[in-house]
């Protein structure tokens, strides 16, 4: 079962049409994505922290320490989860206070649907959310103008990275699978967060972010994915076609040193892609990895992304 179910109606999209959708600002109908202010970035971070905060609160209300013990997790792990939950609550309070101090209106908690059925599904989603959190802060760092805010965001980033490593280790995954973490743009992060958001208060500030069409790793992909593994990326309930005059769609694997491209071959329900090897001297594709579809094989921007990202665990 996909962690990121899509609710889009069945339709056909060309890459040209998707590019137009991707860069449209929600309120102003511009042809390019608006620049984010520091206030926007803090509210963007707060949006993610609200989601994580509610996620851990909901799970700890649903499952008791004895439930975790029955699933094979001791009191030390349960207490550490409570600490992680407390960290997320503190991040919410800190970012809310920072926005108020800057005379900016903070976003508030939304209504979410996590569909957690048991402790194992919780841990899998926890690992994904913590990894996305790391990539979100890392990707936003370059756009923060205030040194004070940048330092504060960096201090949260390092804690999120420790959360991620702890959960990964609990799942018997490498706690540090790569020498580099992966930055994601706000639109890429929002694409991954949006399926969990049912609704938000109508009077909350509207952030200049937009979700791309959903892209998902097929549940039938090999359990152990490495460079050279052929995988299927699903385009749920829509068909993606190349722009007029083009015959090729590419999968772009995002890394801190730049995307690594592979040709994507259309198959029933999505695309078949062979995971590429990153060029020597660049960041490799390892751990929680992200791949988008694009009609361009030279760069990845919010203007060129057609779908995704999808999340893969690469060994």
Image (tube, rainbow, N blue to C red):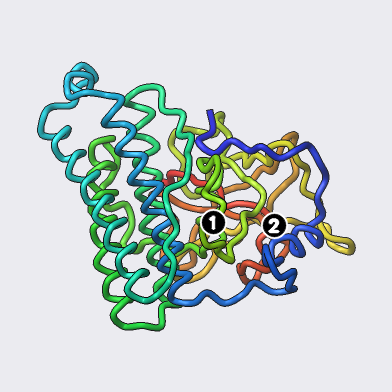
**Neighbours of disc 1 within 10 Å: few (<14), some (14-19), many (20+):** few
* Residue appearing at x 68%, y 41% in the figure: 235
**Neighbours of disc 2 within 10 Å: few (<14), some (14-19), many (20+):** many
* Residue appearing at x 31%, y 70% in the figure: 98
- Is residue 108 placed above or below 280 in the rendered structure? above
* Residue appearing at x 38%, y 50% in the figure: 50
* Residue appearing at x 38%, y 64% in the figure: 137
Q: Is residue 16 in sight in this rendering? A: yes
Q: Position of residue 301 (x, y in %)?
A: 61, 69
- The answer to which quarter of the image holds residue 114 is top left
Asked if the residues shown at circle 2 and circle 1 are in contact, with their CB atoms under 8 angstroms apart, the answer is no
Tag in front: 2 or 1: 1
State the residue lying farthest toward the right: 245
Q: Along the horizontal axis of the image, is 82 left or right of 109? A: left
Q: Position of residue 9 (x, y in %)?
A: 76, 37
- The answer to which quarter of the image holds residue 305 is bottom right
- For the residue pair 203 and 81, the one nearer the viewer reads as 203
The tally of labels here is 2
- Is residue 121 placed above or below 201 in the rendered structure? above
Q: Is residue 276 in sight in this rendering? A: no
Q: Position of residue 196 (x, y in %)?
A: 51, 40
Q: What is the C-alpha distance between the residues marked 2 and 1?
A: 30 Å
- For the residue pair 184 and 220, the one nearer the viewer reads as 184
Q: Position of residue 203 (x, y in %)?
A: 54, 56
Q: Earlier in the sequence, mark 2 or mark 1?
A: 1
* Location of the C terminus (image quadrant): top left
User: Label 1: which residue?
Assistant: 203
State the residue lying farthest toward the top: 70
User: Label 2: which residue?
Assistant: 306
Q: Secondary structure at mark 1?
A: loop
């Amino acid at each position: 079962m996909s962690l990121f179910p899509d609710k889009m109606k069945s339709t056909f999209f060309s890459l040209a049409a998707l590019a137009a959708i991707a860069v449209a600002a929600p309120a102003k109908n511009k042809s390019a994505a608006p620049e984010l202010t520091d206030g926007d970035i803090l509210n963007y971070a707060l949006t993610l922290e609200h989601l994580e905060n509610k996620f851990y609160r909901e799970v700890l209300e649903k499952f008791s320490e004895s439930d975790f013990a029955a699933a094979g997790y001791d009191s030390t792990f349960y207490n550490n989860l409570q600490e992680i939950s407390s960290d997320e609550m503190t991040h919410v309070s800190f970012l809310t206070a920072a926005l108020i101090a800057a005379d900016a209106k903070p976003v508030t908690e939304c209504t979410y649907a996590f569909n957690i059925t048991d402790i194992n599904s919780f841990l899998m989603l926890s690992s994904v959310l913590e990894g996305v959190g790391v990539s979100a802060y890392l990707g936003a760092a370059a756009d923060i103008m205030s040194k004070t805010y940048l330092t504060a965001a960096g201090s949260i980033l390092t804690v999120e990275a420790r959360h991620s490593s702890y959960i990964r280790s609990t799942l018997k995954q490498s706690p540090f699978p790569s020498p580099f973490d992966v930055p994601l743009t706000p639109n890429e992060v929002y694409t991954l967060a949006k399926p969990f958001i049912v609704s938000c208060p109508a009077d909350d500030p509207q952030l200049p972010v937009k979700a791309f069409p959903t892209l998902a790793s097929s549940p039938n992909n090999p359990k152990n994915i490495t460079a050279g593994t052929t995988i299927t990326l699903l385009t749920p309930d829509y068909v993606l076609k190349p722009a007029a005059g083009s015959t090729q769609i590419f999968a772009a694997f995002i890394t801190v040193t730049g995307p690594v491209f592979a040709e994507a071959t259309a198959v029933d329900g999505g695309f078949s892609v062979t995971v590429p090897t990153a060029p020597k001297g660049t960041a490799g594709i390892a751990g929680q990895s992200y791949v988008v579809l694009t009609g361009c094989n030279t760069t990845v921007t919010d203007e060129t992304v057609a779908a995704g990202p999808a999340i893969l665990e690469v060994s």
